[in-house]
Image (cartoon, coloured by chain):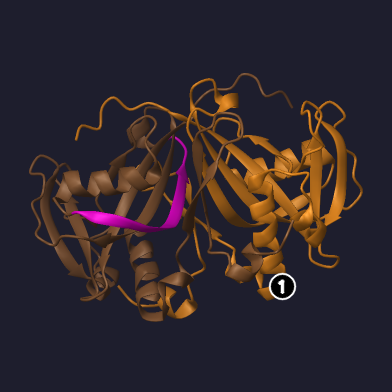
Chain colours: A brown, B orange
Amino acid sequence: PSRLPVYATHQVGVAGTVFDEATGRVLVVQDRNKSKNTWKFPGGLSDPGETIVNTAVREVFEETGIKSEFKSLLSVRQQHQHPGAFGNSDMYFICRLKPLSFEINFCQQECVRCEWMDIVKLVRTTDTTPITNRIARLLLYGFREGFEKIDLQVKELPAIYTGLFYQLYHKELPESYEQICS
Amino acid sequence: PSRLPVYATHQVGVAGTVFDEATGRVLVVQDRNKSKNTWKFPGGLSDPGETIVNTAVREVFEETGIKSEFKSLLSVRQQHQHPGAFGNSDMYFICRLKPLSFEINFCQQECVRCEWMDIVKLVRTTDTTPITNRIARLLLYGFREGFEKIDLQVKELPAIYTGLFYQLYHKELPESYEQICS
């Protein structure tokens, strides 16, 4: 099949699940422009040229005032005819972040509420979306049985032609498999 | 931050690693338009509105003549200023497929070679790209220690507003976590 025409079909969004392992709580928000009191994870669209990792950290900070660092990629959602994408498709990445600060200072334009919520409470609430509920269950699984069960690691590799770097996400590869000689 | 303007920034491509568990071999090709004898996995760009799952199966069939079924998502790569994307960014998904046929009938326009290669040979060859080498190691790990170590499952969920479905990919969630009541 021909490689032409080549054009962009997807917008990219990123959500950050900032999980505090010391307390078992996760950072959640309620959007201002929603009819229901729906808890969700902070996030938003990537700027052009921005990495998934950087979008996650930036959007969490802009929306909630919480500083964080990237730990892993947890999930990807692909949605066609996304209502917020004006006919484009939407690729949405859900990341796990570690909090570096704890005092919430949320964006009043975007959110009406923001809090650290116990992960079990988030799993049990009906005031949420199907995707948030599923990711909450995944986080609870990781918290109780080890985050290596749910985490995808990121590795930066050099692109041959551009001299730039790309990011590759997958389950962690044990050292013994890294070291097999070519 | 404003949600406007919203526009597509990424093209989406998909590679299929068709792995035959009975023999430990994987389907690889060599592109016609490359200077080196570089082994890679078959794949290509998604059509507008096409799911990752369907692109993987379609591209493998068009390129190699092999019929297959989707098993899991293994990896995602994000690359900005991708040479083949004319200034767009590229999101590339690597899937694991199960072969449903074995007789190769490859596309002569796209490929110069196509074969079932032992996964250990693919891990050890230098005639490949960094990303293919890394995914080969991941496949070897899954083959030896269980594919549940590397697989992301896909789940179709209903989108609230459009009535359409979206696909959510993440590590399999144990039944006990699926069943916690809301």
Q: Where is residue B164 in the image (x, y as percent from the top left)?
A: 46, 44
- Magenta stretch, main secondary structure class: strand
Residue B25, by quadrant, is: bottom right
Q: Which residue is drawn at 27% across and 65% down?
A: A19
**Horizontal relation, residue A53 to residue A169: left or right:** left
**Horizontal relation, residue A77 to residue B55: left or right:** left
User: In this rendering, is residue A34 above or below A102?
Assistant: above
Q: How many marks?
A: 1
Task: Decide whether residue A71 is among the magenta residues.
Answer: yes
Q: Which residue is drawn at 60% across and 29% down?
A: A161
Residue B7 visible? The answer is yes
Which residue is nearer to you in this view: A55 or B20? A55
Which residue is nearer to you in this view: A143 or A87? A143
Span of residues in magenta: A67-81
Residue A129 visible? The answer is no
Q: Where is residue A119 in the image (x, y as percent from the top left)?
A: 26, 71
Residue B100, by quadrant, is: bottom right
How many neighbours does mark 1 have within 10 angstroms: few (below 14), some (14-19), or many (20 or more)?
Answer: few
**Horizontal relation, residue B125 to residue A129: left or right:** right
Quadrant containing the N terminus of chain B is top left
Three-letter residue code for mark 1: Arg
Residue hosting label 1: B144
Using the image, name the chain to which the residue with label 1 belongs.
Answer: B
Q: Where is residue B133 in the image (x, y as percent from the top left)?
A: 69, 51
Report helix, strand or loop for mark 1: helix
Q: Residue at x 86, y 42 (%)?
A: B114
Residue B127, by quadrant, is: top right
Q: Which residue is drawn at 44% across and 80% down?
A: B176
Quadrant containing the C terminus of chain B is bottom left
Which residue is nearer to you in this view: B143 or B131? B131
